[in-house]
């Protein structure tokens, strides 16, 4: 019941701010598509660069949508509204609260990715996006929702959430196999960037889009991130309850 309640809260928030959320999901990716995809007339791996770019933009949209749905709101609720304290004294099991936040954030990310898929429909050509692509987008959203949860628990002020976006989300947006292939990066740095969750998500969605199997390594990496950050968030909230 606690999970449903949290997801319902996210749904009410989504309905209230539908136009703002949709515009936020559209503007930056559209700018990237126009500037990089249509402004740079080139090829990547023998294909039009736009075919390389679209899967990366979709992966990035699921990341930013999920992260932004959790990080700032949870920081405000914890630091100023004290909503987290109210949850702790309520009969709602804390694990249900955490899982509800993760699922709610991932659905927001899935919506952001779906908006990009809809907008790029006329220029996608023969790129393939199927149910497995949706599953990867959802899993990626869950990963970044858990990361946002952990960072919001660590935030000391309202201003920390935008800083986390600048320090973590923005670098990953440009480095993690979205706009340019990691194959061109120096050895060592390439491997470090390659194990980041967005790199794996971009690679898997791009493989499916080109009719290839995504492989199991990417799923394993995303599952590992989800398990680690999910455990950290659980430890944090239960430790706070026991103080």
Image (tube, rainbow, N blue to C red):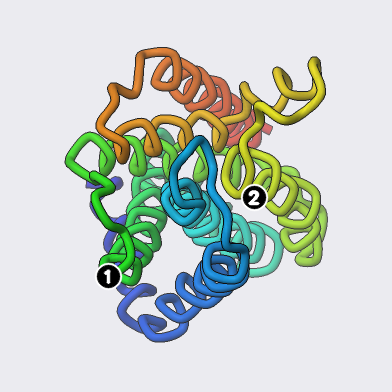
Q: Quadrant of the C terminus?
A: top right
Which residue occupies the foreground of this view, 105 or 132?
132
107 or 206, which is in the foreground?
Answer: 206
Residue at image location 54% in from the left, 24% down from the top: 225
| Residue 226 to residue 3: above or below | above
Is 232 or 35 nearer to us in this picture?
35
Residue 66, visible in the rendered structure:
no
> Where residue 224 sits in the image (x, y, percent)?
50, 17
The residue sitting at 53% across, 69% down in the picture is: 38
Residue 185, image quadrant: top right
Q: Nearer the viewer, mark 2 or mark 1?
A: 1
The residue where tag 1 is placed is 122
Q: Is residue 164 left or right of residue 148?
A: right
Picture coordinates of residue 129, whole percent (x, y) = 24, 46
Q: Which mark is residue 25?
A: none
Pick whichever of labels 2 and 1 is earlier in the sequence.
1
Crowding at mark 2 (Cα within 10 Å: few <14, some 14-19, many 20+)? many
Residue 211 in view (yes/no):
yes
Q: Which mark is residue 173?
A: 2
The percent coordinates of residue 113 (x first, y second) are 37, 57
Is 76 displayed left or right of 18 in the figure? right
Q: Position of residue 165 (x, y in %)?
A: 71, 56
The residue located at (53%, 48%) in the rendering is: 43
Residue 150 location, quadrant: top right
């Amino acid at each position: 019941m606690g999970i449903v309640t949290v997801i319902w809260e996210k749904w009410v928030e989504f309905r209230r701010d539908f136009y703002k959320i949709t515009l936020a999901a559209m503007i930056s990716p559209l700018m990237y598509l126009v500037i990089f995809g249509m402004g740079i007339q080139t090829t990547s791996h023998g294909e039009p660069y736009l075919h390389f770019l679209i899967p990366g933009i979709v992966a990035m949209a699921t990341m930013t949508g999920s992260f932004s749905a959790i990080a700032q709101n949870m920081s405000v609720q914890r630091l100023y509204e004290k909503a987290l304290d109210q949850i702790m004294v309520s009969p709602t099991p804390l694990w249900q609260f955490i899982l509800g936040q993760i699922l709610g954030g991932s659905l927001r990310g899935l919506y952001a990715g779906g908006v990009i898929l809809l907008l790029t429909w006329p220029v996608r050509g023969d790129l393939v996006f199927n149910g497995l692509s949706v599953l990867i987008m959802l899993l990626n959203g869950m990963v970044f929702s858990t990361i946002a949860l952990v960072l919001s628990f660590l935030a000391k002020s309202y201003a920390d959430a935008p800083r986390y976006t600048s320090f973590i989300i923005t670098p990953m947006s440009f480095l993690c196999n979205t706009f340019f292939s990691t194959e061109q990066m120096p050895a060592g740095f390439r491997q470090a960037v390659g194990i980041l969750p967005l790199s794996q998500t971009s690679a898997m969605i791009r493989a499916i889009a080109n009719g290839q199997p995504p492989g199991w390594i990417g799923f394993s990496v995303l599952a590992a991130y989800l398990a680690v950050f999910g455990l950290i968030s659980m430890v944090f909230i239960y430790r706070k309850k026991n103080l």
